[in-house]
Image (cartoon, rainbow, N blue to C red):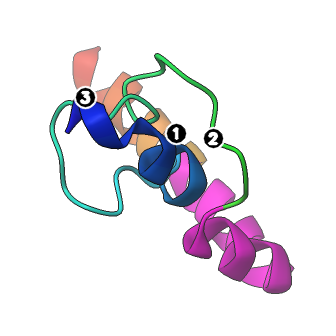
C-alpha cells in the first residue's frame, strides 16, 4: 500500500474512510491530507438535508450514551 499513497490522497477521506478498505490508509489514519472531497463528501454536499439529519441523529446518540452512563 505504501507505494500508492497518491491514490489514497486522491480518493480516500478522513471522514468516510479508505475507498480501498485498507487498514493502514494514510488519509483515514490522518497521516496525510486528502487532495479532493471523496464521493461521500460530494454526496453530502449535494444533500444538505441528509447531512443535517445525520447531525441531529449524532446528537441524539450522544445524549443517549450520556444518559446510559448515569
Q: Residues within 10 Å of mark 2 (few under 14, many from 20)?
A: many
Q: Main secondary structure of the magenta part?
A: helix
In-front residue for pair 5/17: 5
Where is residue 7 drawn, in percent x and y? 45, 53
Q: Is residue 60 visible?
A: no
Give the residue number, with chain letter if any, for mark 3. 68
Residue sitting at 25 percent across and 30 percent down?
Answer: 2
Which label number is shown at residue 14? 1
Q: Which corner quadrant of the image does residue 28 belong to?
A: top left
Q: Range of the magenta residues?
A: 38-58
Residue sitting at 25 percent across and 28 percent down?
Answer: 68
Say if 65 sits above or below 70 in the image. below
Which numbered disc flags the more N-terminal residue, 3 or 2? 2
Element marked by disc 1: loop
Query: In what quadrant of the picture does the C terminus appear?
Result: top left
Where is residue 48 drawn, in percent x and y? 84, 77
Residue 35 lies within the magenta run: no
Give the residue number, with chain letter if any, for mark 2. 34
Left or right of residue 15: residue 3: left
Q: Residues within 10 Å of mark 1 (few under 14, many from 20)?
A: some
Q: Nearer the viewer, mark 3 or mark 2?
A: 2
In-front residue for pair 54/24: 24
Give how far apart the Cα atoms at labels 3 and 2 are.
Answer: 36 Å
Element marked by disc 3: helix
Q: Residues within 10 Å of mark 3 (few under 14, many from 20)?
A: few
In contact (CB < 8 Å): disc 2 and disc 1: yes
Say if 45 sits above or below 14 in the image. below
Q: Nearer the viewer, mark 2 or mark 1?
A: 2
Amino acid at each position: 500500500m505504501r507505494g500508492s499513497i497518491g491514490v489514497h490522497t486522491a480518493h480516500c477521506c478522513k471522514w468516510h474512510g479508505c475507498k480501498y478498505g485498507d487498514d493502514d490508509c494514510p488519509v483515514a489514519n490522518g497521516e496525510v491530507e486528502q487532495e479532493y472531497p471523496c464521493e461521500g463528501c460530494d454526496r453530502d454536499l449535494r444533500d444538505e438535508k441528509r447531512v443535517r439529519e445525520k447531525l441531529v441523529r449524532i446528537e441524539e446518540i450522544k445524549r443517549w450514551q450520556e444518559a446510559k452512563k448515569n
